[in-house]
Image: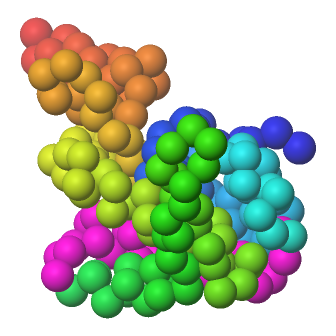
Amino acid sequence: MSDPRPHIGEPLALDLLNTRWMRDGAVQDLLTDTDGLAIWLASNGLDHLCPADDTALRHLRQARDAIKAAVDGSPKEAAPLVDEVLAHGRIRATLTADGPGEVPEFRSPAWGPAWLAARNYLTLLVTAPDRIRVCAHEACVLYFFDTSRNGTRRWHSMATCGNRAKASRHYARAKED
């Protein structure tokens, strides 16, 4: 089955947050069952890490809630939630034929996707925390990492939410005339 979400391809942590989206005024959730988990794992190339079972689903939902709390609320208050997910894995330094490397290791394979998403959130915080954004459209709940040159992107997609906002402003101006 193909990924039904309207916006994919964001960094892993934000792609996990985008497993919830709005359609026709109702919240949709890809992670309601293991079928949705299988779709998300495959969409992110993580289907080799663990089976799409109830345990991995529970861990991934925990990571999604922790990352959402950190992005939407107080990072200080959410830190223990993210740390709880991160406690289930680590990075092992290695030396490969190509030079230094890092290998993620997990207490259990079922923690792998959740841990990688939480770790990716830390990477985004180090890279550019001010570029982690929620779409500016009032009816959208999607997140994106602003990669625009000047950092002023407002919509997860100009083609959808940006155009809706422009059309809404145009309609409001037309009503005033």
Of the pair 9 and 21, the residue shown nearer to us: 9
Residue at (72% x, 46% y) in the render: 45
Q: Is residue 65 left or right of residue 43?
A: left
Residue that appears at 15% across and 16% down = 173
Task: Name which quarter of the figure residue 31 lies in.
Answer: bottom right
Quadrant showing the N terminus: top right
The one nearer the camera, 22 or 30, is 30
Q: Quadrant of residue 169?
A: top left
Q: Quadrant of the C terminus?
A: top left
Left or right: residue 51 compared with residue 30: right
The image shows residue 133 at horizontal and vertical percentages of 27, 46
| Residues rendered magenta in the picture | 52-76
- Asked whether the viewer can see residue 17, the reply is no
Picture coordinates of residue 104 (x, y %)? 58, 66
Left or right for 116, reference 172:
right
Residue 175 falls within the magenta-colored stretch = no
Residue at 34% across, 55% down: 123
